[in-house]
C-alpha cells in the first residue's frame, strides 16, 4: 500500500495486521485505537545525518564546512520531519544519547543556528558564491523534509543553494558519483541511521576519513584515522570513552558530517490479531504469531 492514509485506515479496520513504520503525522489516528498497539521497539532510535562532499568546492574548505554546520540546527530538522517531541530528542552526542559514548564535547556548533558565525566562517574561507547542490529525497517519509530545511538555513547563512528533488533510489545512485556537481555530482545530502549502525566510530560509516576509500562524501583526515585505530585497539573502557570523545570533537572540527537529532519510529499492529512482536533495532520478521 503506497498510500500511508490507506494503510492506516486498513490497520484501524482490521484489514491488515501490522505497519512497520507509520508516518508520525498519522500516529494520532492510531494511538487512541483500543485494538491497535503503537510501540517504539528501539528505545535508542535513529539519528539524522547531514553529509557534505569534501571533494569539490566549496566544501573542500574546512571553514566553509564549519559554516554549514553553524547554519543548521537539530530542532528544525526534528520539527519538520517528526513533529511530536514525544518521538524526538535534541542530542549533542554523535554516538547517541543514552549510550556509553554519550558526550556533548565539540557539538555546540550544531545545536543552534548561528548565522553570524556562519557568515564569518564563509568570509574567512573565501566563499565566492559557488552554488551548492543539495539533494532532497522525496519518497521516504522520514527524509522528505530534510532537504528543504537544510537549504533554507544554508541560504540564510549566505550560501548559494540549488535544491534538487529526486526519489531516494536516484539519490543513492548519485551520491556515489565523484564528479563535480555541474557534471552530475553533489554537495550535500541528508539521510538517517538506526542506532545499531552508529554506536561507535568503527561501525559508524560516517567517521571514516580514508579519503577516496571513505563513505560517500570522502572526508580525508589522518588524525581521525589515528583516533579510530586507537579506539579499535584500546581495551580499557574508560580510555576508550576518552578516545570516543576526542573523535567527536575532531569530527566536528573537520566536519566529517553533522548529526541532525535523535528520533524514534514506532511500529503499529492489531493487538487482537498478532502477538510476539519483539523489541529490536527494527521490526524483526520472526516470532510473530497470528
Image: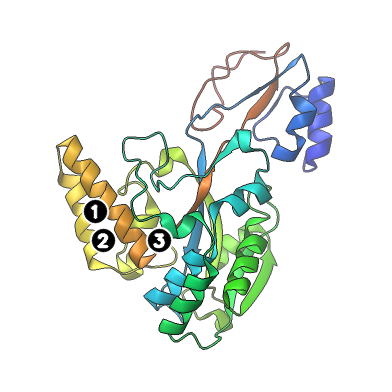
Contact check, label 2 and label 3, Cβ < 8 Å = no
Q: Secondary structure at mark 2?
A: helix
For the point 51% across and 88% down, the residue is: 128
Figure quadrant of residue 285 = top right
Q: Earlier in the sequence, mark 1 or mark 3?
A: 3
For the point 70% across and 38% down, the residue is: 24
Q: Where is residue 166? Give x, y as percent.
A: 68, 64
The disc at residue 224 is 2
View extreme (front): residue: 116
Does residue 77 sit above or below 128 in this rendering? above
Does residue 99 sit above or below 261 in this rendering? above
Q: Secondary structure at mark 3?
A: loop
Residue underneath mark 3: 215
Does residue 176 sit above or below 90 in this rendering? below
The disc at residue 158 is none
For the point 44% across and 67% down, the residue is: 217
Amino acid at each position: 500500500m503506497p498510500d500511508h492514509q490507506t494503510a492506516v485506515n486498513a490497520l484501524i479496520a482490521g484489514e491488515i495486521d501490522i505497519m512497520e513504520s507509520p508516518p508520525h503525522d498519522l500516529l494520532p489516528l492510531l494511538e487512541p485505537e483500543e485494538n491497535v498497539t503503537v510501540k517504539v521497539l528501539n528505545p535508542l532510535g535513529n539519528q539524522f545525518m547531514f553529509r557534505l562532499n569534501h571533494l569539490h568546492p566549496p566544501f573542500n574548505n574546512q571553514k566553509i564546512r564549519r559554516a554549514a554546520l553553524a547554519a543548521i540546527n537539530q530542532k528544525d530538522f526534528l520539527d519538520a520531519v517528526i513533529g511530536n517531541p514525544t518521538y524526538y530528542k535534541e542530542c549533542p552526542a554523535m554516538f547517541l544519547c543514552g549510550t556509553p559514548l554519550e558526550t556533548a564535547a565539540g557539538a555546540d556548533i550544531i545545536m543552534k543556528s548561528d548565522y553570524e558565525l556562519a557568515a564569518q566562517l564563509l568570509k574567512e574561507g573565501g566563499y565566492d558564491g559557488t552554488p551548492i547542490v543539495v539533494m532532497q529525497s522525496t519518497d521516504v517519509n522520514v527524509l522528505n523534509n530534510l532537504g528543504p530545511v537544510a537549504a533554507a538555513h544554508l541560504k540564510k547563512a549566505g550560501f548559494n543553494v540549488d535544491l534538487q528533488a529526486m526519489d531516494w533510489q536516484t539519490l543513492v545512485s548519485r551520491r556515489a558519483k565523484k564528479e563535480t556537481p555541474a557534471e552530475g555530482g553533489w554537495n550535500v545530502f541528508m539521510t538517517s541511521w538506526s542506532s545499531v549502525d552508529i554506536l561507535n566510530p568503527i561501525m559508524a560509516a560516517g567517521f571514516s576519513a580514508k579519503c577516496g576509500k571513505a563513505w560517500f562524501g570522502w572526508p580525508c583526515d589522518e588524525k581521525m584515522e589515528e583516533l579510530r585505530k586507537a579506539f579499535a585497539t584500546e581495551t580499557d573502557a574508560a580510555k576508550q570513552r576518552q578516545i570516543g570523545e576526542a573523535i567527536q570533537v575532531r569530527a566536528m572540527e573537520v566536519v566529517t558530517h553533522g548529526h541532525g537529532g535523535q528520533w524514534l519510529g514506532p511500529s503499529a499492529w492489531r493487538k487482537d490479531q498478532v502477538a510476539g512482536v519483539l523489541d529490536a533495532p527494527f521490526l524483526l520478521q520472526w516470532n510473530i504469531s497470528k
